[in-house]
Image (cartoon, grey):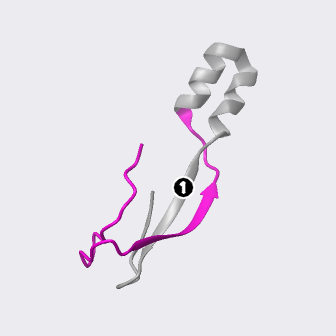
Amino acid sequence: MAKIPTDCPKCRAQFSMVAISERKGGFSGGKAVAGALIAGPVGLAAGALGKKKTTYQCRKCGFQIEV
């Protein structure tokens, strides 16, 4: 699991990162393979489930990172 940033990697301001958006989507090859092994061809759809990304922005310099 990815670490939630609290300090800005660009300007090094402490505790300045805040979540500004979330998105779901993408395709996970590992989940697709596991789904195919368990449920056959229908399990390939499992690769598109549950992938979530959150965008964080520094309050001081505006730097953005997606985790």
Q: Secondary structure at mark 1?
A: strand
Secondary structure mostly seen in magenta is loop
Q: Residue at x 64, y 22 (%)?
A: 35
Q: Looking at the picture, how far across and down is residue 7, in whole percent?
A: 30, 68
Which x, y percent locates residue 32?
61, 29
The residue to which callout 1 is attached is 53
The answer to whether residue 13 is magenta is yes
Provide residue 6's location: percent of width, then percent of height: 34, 65
**Tag 1: amino acid:** Lys
Confirm whether the magenta stretch covers residue 23. yes
Near-viewer residue (43 or 14): 14
* Residue that sits furthest to the right in the current view: 42
Residue at far left of view: 12
Q: Which residues are magenta?
A: 1-29
Q: Residue furthest bottom?
A: 60
In the image, is residue 31 above or below residue 53? above
Residue 41 % position (x, y): 73, 20
**How many numbered tags mark residues here?**
1
How crowded pointer 1 is (Cα within 10 Å; few <14, some 14-19, many 20+) is rated as some
Judge from the rendering whether residue 26 lies leftward or rightward of residue 67; answer left or right. right
Q: Is residue 7 above or below residue 60?
A: above
Picture residue at 58% right of the left edge, 22% below the top: 34
Observer-nearest of 50 and 16: 16
